[in-house]
Amino acid sequence: MSAVRRVVPIVGVSDLATSAAAYRDVLGLVEVMNHGWIATFADPDGRHQVSLLTRDATAAVDPQLSVEVDDVDAAHHRALAAGLEIVHPLTDETWGVRRFFFRDAGGTVVNVLSHPPGTLDG
């Protein structure tokens, strides 16, 4: 079984810059990643994170939760074996992650990802 490295809730927003101001200026979170359509904020220690998402860049559905694992291929295999609905196929994205999405029984879309070995987070 692959190990979970982090779990990050994803909040849907209509205006990334305006929403980001509240997380930064009111809560004191630090922007640790921004692709223009998704930004991630963390506490100063980097232990707690939240992402703000306008619209996913490559998927037809937007996730509500990201789970980073050390072996996304193994997680994908287990998701298929469990009969979960895969709503975004296992994909190597241009920004350096390998990921897939599944929809859980309650309807939540979960982004499962890994950073390849040798990358900043891999």
Image (cartoon, grey):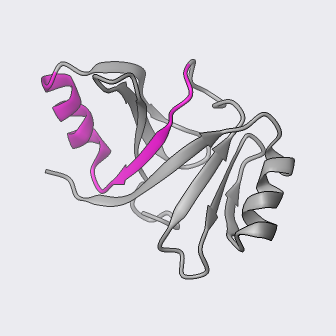
The magenta-colored residue range is: 61-82
Determine whether, in the image, residue 79 is placed left or right of residue 20. Answer: left
Determine whether, in the image, residue 24 is placed left or right of residue 100. Answer: right
Task: Write down the quadrant of residue 54 in the picture.
Answer: top right
Residue 115 visible in the displayed image: no
Depth order, front residue of 44/93: 44
In the rendered image, residue 6, in percent from the top left (x then y), is placed at 39, 60
In the rendered image, residue 73, in percent from the top left (x then y), is placed at 27, 40
Which residue corresponds to the image point at 51% horizontal and 33% vertical from the top-left? 63
Which residue corresponds to the image point at 40% horizontal and 35% vertical from the top-left? 110
Quadrant position of the C terminus in the picture: bottom left
**Count of marks, rendered view:** 0
Task: Write down the quadrant of residue 58 in the picture.
Answer: top right
Residue 105 visible in the displayed image: yes
Task: Write down the quadrant of residue 53 in the picture.
Answer: top right
81 in the magenta segment: yes
Vertical arrangement, residue 71 with respect to residue 112, above or below: below
Q: Residue furthest right?
A: 18
Q: Residue furthest front?
A: 26
Determine whether, in the image, residue 122 is placed left or right of residue 25. Answer: left
Vertical arrangement, residue 42 with respect to residue 51, above or below: below
In the rendered image, residue 38, in percent from the top left (x then y), is placed at 68, 45
Which residue corresponds to the image point at 57% horizontal and 56% vertical from the top-left? 50
In the rendered image, residue 71, in percent from the top left (x then y), is placed at 27, 50
Which residue corresponds to the image point at 13% horizontal and 25% vertical from the top-left? 81
